[in-house]
């Protein structure tokens, strides 16, 4: 009864909003409408003049309650219709409390962790007047040369889709409109060069790059950002096929599309418009509603498409509650959620190698802590860290945990912290080398030469090609950029207070020249082997560490793979000495299809917790979603054999095969009527 009443009230409110929106549209001048379609940066020169006339639709990069309130007051005083500003910010993995970078959050394989990150970020940002975040970033990233891999959930569309939905829930259930970005195939930039051309087939778009966006739309994402790049011959920001046919018609998205920063005016550079005014017309006609920063939309002519875009902006403002409550309470209190930040940072850490069970370290061991990155607390925050301020460094974390930190000669073990600086990943941070910087490599080699056992901690926003280390260092820990509580989380793992459970959301290459490296590649007619095969002469063809890989201080055994109807299951046993968490992974291959299909694709995962000696049966149900792929304009499940793996990574596991003809397959969401 209550629910029916609530739905009724909600319906009535929505209706009342629509009536107000139509009234506003009738009364607004063209100039006022174009103001709504234009986003200003907080430090932009023409912002003040636009505010005086109440012509500001949205503003990005304000950071504090006083600033947002002040701008809001100016806008409301200038706006005849009292239309408030929508404040936007890149809140990707925290606002004051900085969580691990999204690539690291993906390494938790824990959708609840992603939801928690979004929830806490939303609350902190919202307290400062921000109502719209440019997140989650949903670009499937297979090329580690591309620095923005740091902001993504890695190389796999399935994992990225699960994370996408969790982020959207976390942001939007806590007062921030989310933005699925960058639509689309931005991560496919040629050569890994940021902003570059993406040459992708429709099949790759549909099967790889679009699914995380579809998951965000299905989770109710309010906004989508059009990307900088060209997709084939057509820039994503002037691409009606993607922005209208796919996003709106096929998927039923009725939220707002914002361009990326200056991406409208940059259509001139792409060579599809002679002037910014022509670029604006093309972007609007293609489906962009809001123009970020460049002011090109201020040149548009009146028309139905302008009204439609304004309608979407106003709806977003109603949804954000701005018409009722345009201001925020001002306070000087900054609270940080350290406990969640530490827990999730610990979960993000991936133990790549642990020869001779060197880790965890007993606290009685004397440690020589090496590497400049152990001291710094700036890098720990990652390339896009909002108002994060500072973080716990690894030295501080080890010290707080009671570590005995000594000089090199006294030490029992060396902990070396190396990697890349925060500026070396993120936007515009494409690189041709994935090696440790040469001076760090030399230092590492000198440390190994001492003969003392070395633990290498890698801090980075992308997988680094630590190939030499993999052959010479007994223990390697991938510690990403872990955020506010990073140093404490590293200490938790080094001393075994936290048993590592992270798994790689990207393959670790042996060398940058291998890029792109990803496990779900297509087969070749000549698999790597003898001379005339698909391989390199100088290095093995596969990754240094595969997607899904990650060790624990305990040992999990997989056995007794079974198929019962649609259910595939395996028994997982903790055969080691400690309680631990394992991420059990399901992979599928369509063995013979009408087109060539990837050698393996992730289709499910579960995080399970097991005490020593305990075992559990983990089940996955095969539905259309696990077996289908897009080809020739449709999602299909083709008859025939599928290989199915349950395992601890993309490179290991128990395998069986099933025939699609023997399964009960419900229609996929693709075939269900749209909302
Ligand atoms: C450009 C980036 O590509 C995008 O991700 C970000 O949201 C905007 N700048 C706004 O800062």
Image (cartoon, rainbow, N blue to C red):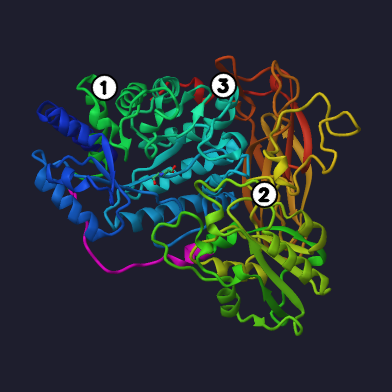
Vertical position of residue 30 compared to residue 126: above or below? above
At x 26% / y 34%, what residue is drawn? Answer: 37
Pinpoint residue 422: horizontal percent, then vertical percent.
53, 58
Q: Residue 327: in sight, yes or no?
A: no
At x 60% / y 26%, what residue is drawn? Answer: 204
- Some atom of ligand 1 lies within 8 Å of the CB belonging to the residue at label 2: no
Q: Nearer the viewer, mark 1 or mark 2?
A: 2
Viewer-side residue, 379 vs 1: 379
Q: Distance from label 2 to label 3 (Cα)?
A: 30 Å
Q: Residue 283: in sight, yes or no?
A: yes
Q: Nearer the viewer, mark 2 or mark 3?
A: 2
Viewer-side residue, 478 vs 502: 478
Q: Which mark is residue 202?
A: 3
Q: Which quarter of the figure is the C terminus placed in?
A: top left
Residue identifier under label 1? 305
Q: Main secondary structure of the magenta part?
A: loop
At x 73% / y 80%, what residue is drawn? Answer: 408
Residue identifier under label 2? 433
Looking at marks 1 and 3 on the same chain, the residue that comes earlier in the sequence is marked by 3
Q: Distance from label 1 to label 2 (Cα)?
A: 46 Å
Which residue is situated farthest in the right direction here?
A: 530
Element carrying mark 3: helix
Which contiguous range is marked in magenta?
A: 325-342
């Amino acid at each position: 009864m209550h629910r029916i009443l609530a739905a009724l009230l909600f319906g009535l409110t929505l209706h009342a909003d629509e009536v107000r929106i139509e009234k506003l549209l009738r009364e607004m001048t063209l100039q006022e409408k174009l103001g709504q379609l234009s986003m200003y940066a907080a430090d932009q020169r023409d912002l003040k003049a636009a505010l005086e006339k109440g012509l500001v639709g949205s503003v990005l990069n304000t950071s504090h309650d006083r600033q947002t309130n002040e701008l809001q007051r100016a806008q409301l005083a200038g706006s005849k219709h009292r239309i408030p500003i929508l404040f936007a910010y890149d809140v990707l993995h925290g606002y004051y409390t900085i969580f691990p970078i999204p690539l690291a959050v993906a390494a938790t394989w824990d959708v609840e962790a992603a939801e928690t990150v979004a929830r806490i970020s939303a609350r902190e940002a919202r307290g400062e007047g921000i109502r719209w975040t440019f997140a989650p970033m949903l670009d499937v990233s297979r090329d580690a040369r591309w620095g923005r891999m740091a902001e993504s959930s890695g190389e796999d569309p399935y994992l990225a889709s699960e994370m996408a939905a969790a982020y959207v829930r976390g942001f939007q259930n806590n007062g921030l409109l989310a933005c699925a970005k960058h639509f689309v195939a931005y991560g496919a930039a040629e050569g890994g060069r940021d902003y570059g051309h993406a040459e992708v087939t429709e099949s790759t778009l549909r099967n790889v790059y679009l699914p995380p966006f579809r998951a965000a739309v299905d989770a109710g994402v309010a906004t989508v950002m059009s990307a900088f790049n060209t997709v084939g011959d057509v820039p994503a920001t002037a691409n009606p096929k993607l922005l209208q046919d796919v996003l709106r018609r096929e998927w039923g998205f009725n939220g707002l599309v914002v361009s990326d920063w200056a991406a409208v005016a940059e259509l001139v550079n792409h060579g599809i418009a002679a002037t910014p005014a022509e670029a604006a017309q093309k972007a609007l006609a293609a489906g962009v509603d809001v123009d970020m920063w460049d002011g090109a939309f201020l040149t548009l002519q009146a028309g139905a498409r302008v009204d439609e875009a304004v309608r979407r902006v106003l709806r977003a403002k109603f949804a954000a509650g701005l018409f009722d409550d345009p201001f925020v309470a001002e306070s000087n209190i900054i609270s940080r959620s350290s406990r969640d930040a530490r827990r999730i940072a610990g979960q993000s850490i991936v133990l790549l190698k642990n020869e001779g069970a060197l880790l965890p370290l007993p606290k009685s061991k004397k440690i020589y802590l090496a590497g400049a990155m152990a001291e710094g607390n700036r890098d720990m925050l990652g390339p896009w860290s909002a108002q994060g301020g500072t973080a716990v460094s690894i030295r501080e974390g080890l010290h707080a945990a009671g570590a005995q930190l000594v000089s090199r000669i006294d030490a029992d073990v060396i902990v070396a912290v190396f990697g890349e600086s925060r500026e070396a990943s993120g936007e515009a941070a494409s690189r041709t080398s994935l090696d440790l910087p040469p001076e760090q490599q030399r230092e590492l080699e000198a440390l190994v030469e001492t003969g003392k056992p070395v633990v290498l901690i890698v801090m980075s926003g992308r997988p680094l090609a630590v190939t030499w280390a993999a052959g010479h260092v007994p223990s390697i820990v991938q510690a990403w950029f872990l955020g506010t509580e990073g140093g404490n989380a590293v200490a938790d793992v080094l001393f075994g207070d936290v048993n590592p459970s992270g798994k790689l959301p990207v393959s670790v290459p042996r060398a940058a020249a291998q890029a792109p490296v990803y496990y779900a590649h297509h087969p070749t007619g000549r698999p790597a082997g003898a001379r005339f095969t698909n391989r390199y002469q100088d290095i093995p063809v596969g990754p240094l560490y595969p997607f899904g890989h990650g060790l624990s201080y305990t040992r999990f055994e997989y056995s007794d793979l079974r198929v019962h109807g649609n259910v595939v299951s395996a028994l997982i046993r903790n055969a080691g000495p400690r309680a631990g968490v394992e991420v059990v992974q399901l992979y599928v291959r369509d063995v013979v299809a009408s087109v060539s299909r990837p050698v393996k694709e992730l289709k499910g995962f579960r995080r399970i917790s097991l005490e020593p000696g305990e075992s559990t049966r983990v089940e996955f149900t095969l539905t259309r979603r696990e077996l289908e792929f897009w080809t020739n304009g449709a999602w299909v499940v083709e008859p025939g054999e599928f290989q199915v793996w349950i395992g601890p990574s993309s490179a290991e596991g128990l395998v069986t095969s099933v025939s699609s003809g023997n399964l009960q397959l419900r229609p996929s969401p693709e075939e269900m009527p749209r909302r």
